[in-house]
Image (spheres, rainbow, N blue to C red):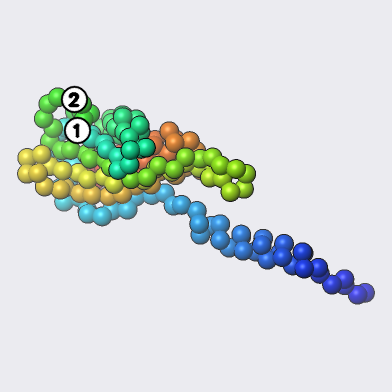
Amino acid sequence: MKQAPKTSAAILKSLTFLALALCLPACAAKSGTRVTSPVTAPLGTFNSAQIVCNAEEERERSYVQKMETQVMVKLKERDTFKEYRLSRDAGQSDIIVNVMILDVKKAGGWGWYGRHSSKVACDVTLRDTKTNGVVGAFSVVGNPRYSSVEEALQDAATQIADHMRASR
């Protein structure tokens, strides 16, 4: 039995599928924690923490208050410290948790080319208020599958709290 020759359209379709199958996993954003400076002192030695959040870009500033609140809630859930303050709260803390929002990408777009998950990238610096020295620094990327920006913020805050709890 003779097999019919493949048309150029069928060959092109096969090559396109193969290229997408190889490229899409490599193009997907990874979530996780990357330590840039290991924690030098156990975080259990600090009693109180102040969470201060900022954003690099003007368009990301609307997420600052949400991120501060999420980080505080996640740290409280894990009993990381005894007292918590946000940037707008008065009073002195033992450690400052400085969260810098670097990038926010919203889910959406048109069809195949659209982004299906939102992504939030942050740098976190832990600073001792008595010595003004850096206790530790790390980066997180919140990128849950098929998520909104709020879910990505929550994922990033969870990673921050988990890393800090592990360093206790």
Of the residues shown, which amino acid type is indicated by label 2? Asp
Q: What residue is pinned by disc 1?
A: 50
Q: Which type of secondary structure does the marked residue at label 1 adopt? A: strand
Horizontal side of residue 90 vs 113, given as left or right: left
Q: Which type of secondary structure does the marked residue at label 2 adopt? A: loop
Dot 2: within a 10 Å radius of its alpha carbon, few (fewer than 14), some, or many (20 or more) residues? few
Residue extending furthest toward the bottom: 2
Residue 165 in view here: no
Image spot of residue 129 (x, y percent): 10, 39
Q: Are marks 2 and 1 in contact (CB under 8 Å)?
A: yes
Give the residue at x 32% y 53%: 34
Give the residue at x 28% y 53%: 35
Q: Residue 96, located in which quarter of the rendered image?
A: top left
Give the residue at x 62% y 44%: 111
Query: Camera-side residue: 147 or 58?
Result: 58
Quadrant into which the C terminus falls: top left
Mark 2 vs mark 1: in front: 2
Horizontal side of residue 157 vs 6, given as left or right: left
Image spot of residue 58 (x, y percent): 33, 38
Q: What residue is pinned by disc 2?
A: 89
